[in-house]
Amino acid sequence: MRRNLLLLTGLAVFLSSCGGGDEDATPDCTVSDLVVSIAGSSNDVCGQGIGEIEAAATDGAGSYEFSIDGQSFQSSGLFTGLEAGAYTVTVRDANDCMKTVTASLSDEGGLTIEATSTSSTCGASTGAIAVEATGDGGNFQYRLDDGAFGSASEFTGVSSGLHIVTVKDEIGCEEDKEVLVLSGVSFKDQVSSIISTNCAVATCHNGTAGIPNFTSFGAIQENAATIKVKTGNKTMPKVGSLTDLEIQTIACWVDDGAKDN
């Protein structure tokens, strides 16, 4: 009887040492067969951030989670709303083993605009803007400010001032560019005398403490935007008034960039 008990005890010890002891062991991810790959992708278009990358995983343990560029993990391998660029996708399985794969997206249909302008006359519309567009889409259409799109890349009869040229292609990409059409108004020949006669006078902008000194070009240039507004709404000068032509001449000079010309 005692012999039988010893045999049973030994068998129990043997079974205990051989069975089920590795169930809680930490998986060795260095020998994991986990594989991640790019199942599909679509490029961005016109810089809109509509690119996509889809990753897939195989040969890992349990279910998979996916992350792109270090962001939070998700159950789906599909990533949307992507711009052109390089990305790193990480997959994680149920054993917390991880593998990575890289993918790159390009930008299809991007537009580049170059524009040149010809000066107008202050108060008239004699300027011109010529536009050159390049890109993948082709069949370019052109628009000036809020006008209609058309096939002509040159606009004539343009007034002085800042304008916006818009180009779109057959894919539907659009690109805007600001274009300044100069009036050619001269500060020395046309604006200086208006300000010195009407503004840089006694009791008004002639160097009195606390008031900009309009006997100095630097002060005039620094306050050019304010001068345009106040002469335009006829609150400047305080004494007397400017003609509509004088007001328009000042506005054109300011729109040209208030240059010392």
Image (tube, helix red, strand yellow):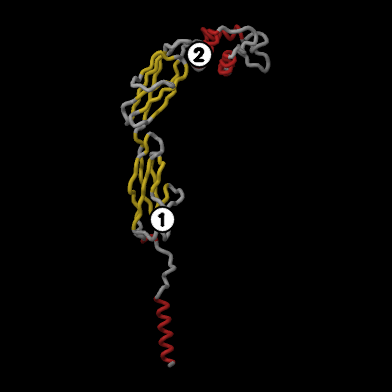
Q: Which residue is mark 1?
A: 92
The residue sitting at 42% across, 82% down in the picture is 12
Question: Mark 1: few, some, or many residues within 10 Å (few <14, many ≥20)?
Answer: many
Q: Position of residue 85 (x, y in %)?
A: 38, 40
Q: Position of residue 176 (x, y in %)?
A: 42, 26
Q: Which residue is mark 2?
A: 252
User: In the rendered view, would you say 173 is above or below 259?
Assistant: below
Position of the N terminus, as image quadrant, is bottom left
**Could you tell me how far apart the alpha carbons at marks 1 and 2 are, in whole angstroms?**
64 Å
Say the numbered circle drawn on residue 121: none
Chain-order first, disc 1 or disc 2: 1
Q: How many marks?
A: 2
Relative side of 157 to 205, left or right: left
* Residue type indicated by callout 1: Arg
Name the residue at the front extreme: 148
Question: Mark 2: few, some, or many residues within 10 Å (few <14, many ≥20)?
Answer: many
Which image quadrant is residue 152 in?
top left
User: In the rendered view, would you say 114 is above or below 85?
Assistant: above
User: In the rendered view, would you say 125 is above or below 8?
Assistant: above
